[in-house]
Image (spheres, rainbow, N blue to C red):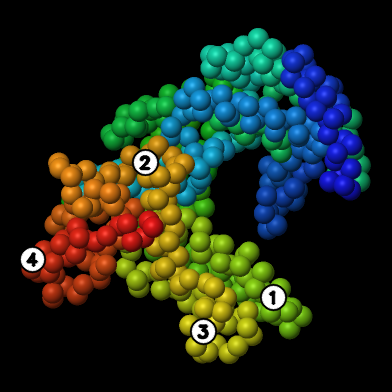
Amino acid sequence: MLQTISPDLLPFITTVINGSLTSGHIPTAFKKARVVPILKKPALDPSDISNYRAVSLLSFLSKILERVVCNQLSDYLMQNNLHDPNQSGFKAAHSTETALLAVTEKLQAARSAKLSSVLILLDLSAAFDTVNHKTLLSTLRSLGICGTAWEWFASYLDGCSYQVTWNGLTSAPRRLSTGVLQGSVLSPLLFSLYTSLSWQNTMASARISACLADISSWMTAHQLKLNPSKTELLIIPGDPSPAQDLAISLSNSMISPSATAHNLGVTMDNQLSFSSHVTNVTRSCRFLLYNIRRIRPFLSTQATQVLVQSLVISRLDYCNSLLAGLPLNTIRPLQMIQNAAARLVFNLPKFSHTTPLLRSLHWRPVAARIRFKTLMLAYKAKNGPAPSYLKALITPRTAPRSLRYTSTARLVPPSLREKGRYTSRLFSVLAPRWWNELPLGIRTAESLSVFKRQLKTYIFLKYLN
């Protein structure tokens, strides 16, 4: 209905938005939110308030106004290079996958230099609800936002109210003195600016504890609260690996290292083998396939395909670039999941041949999907929008004189070192063969030399074009 009558509504909506931006004031009706508590997970205890996610429902016009301001603020930050280059949240061409890929690259590089790394994953309690308005406005002013624009943000934060709806009942309105509304368009960007601060990482236990103490103090000063119970510590040992007895002190709590840690939906292990991640993804996908199979008699082939692609295939594709360069036997369980999903779509028996099924569904095999994702990230890092930390991994090949390959846009391949050394995951997928897959009996100096020569002569343009 709104799309049908949009030509008649647009002039009035434009007048309201322009009036708010030029006056630096937001109508009071735009700052009223209705909070609907939603359980974070169905299996959590509904009697525990901390298990709920407080999502704010705002008016339609207020979200349009926030989207306009968010776009203008993002353009201002980008044009003036005010974004934190290591901040991947709520930014174009950035994602959890690019952030995880950059972290994994650094951890792998440290292992190649026989250095041990410590990965600490911090968790904030009710992060959006504890943002201090004065500190946030001061941060915006330090970024050069002043005048009417600053007054607009001051009006945006002042006078907000919310009501809680539960079981058909609505509470009395309460004033929001701190925090930004979880569920609004502008809040994620403001929270990113509020927490934009860099710390230097250290290696020793005492210095790491001191660093975390500084982080905790900074969080407390900004009314943010760390959650030690959800903080995870992962040690990625070098060669030779040190004793795994490093313990970190945080807020009067001792955090001991674990073999695996959950980072943005990916299970990382201390050997960076991602075998635990593959196991977890396989387990969750099998559970989903089991549930879909129970209702398969009531679904058409097309409906089943849509359901499988949205629930199962999307899980196989999430951050799959981190699996580039791993042995084929590591990712084989994922391929078995995809085969089972194809059989389920066509309602075929367990041992049916899947190659024609995958072709009919236009599903690439898992190894090809990983290769495609890696090539796409490499192409964007070289030619398109991509995070700066990924562009730093790309080195265009330059010739001392004019040669035939000068116009082919080749890249400098990573150097291969001795066995056990590091090869960049971003480019190891381009190698025609895998050194790690060779049997130990034929891993000779001659075979390594051949492998190096094949990699160096591999034509990257074949994939980019």
Q: Earlier in the sequence, mark 4 or mark 3?
A: 3
Amino acid type indicated by mark 2: Lys
Work out whether 287 lies above or below 177. Answer: below
Quarter of the rendering containing residue 445: bottom left
Residue annotated with mark 2: 391
Q: Residue at (32%, 68%) from the top-left corner?
A: 327
Q: Is residue 355 left or right of residue 31?
A: left
Percent x, y of residue 274 = 39, 60
Percent x, y of residue 70 = 65, 30
Quarter of the rendering containing residue 453: bottom left
Work out whether 212 lies above or below 451. Answer: above
Amino acid type indicated by mark 4: Ala
- Looking at the image, which is closer to me, 214 or 35? 35
Residue annotated with mark 3: 356
Q: CA distance from mark 2 to mark 3?
A: 38 Å
Question: Can residue 244 be seen here?
Answer: no
- Looking at the image, which is closer to me, 275 or 378? 378
Q: CA distance from mark 4 to mark 1?
A: 53 Å
For the residues bearing labels 2 and 1, Cβ distance under 8 angstroms? no
Q: Residues within 10 Å of mark 2 (few under 14, many from 20)?
A: some
Residue annotated with mark 4: 445
Residue annotated with mark 1: 302
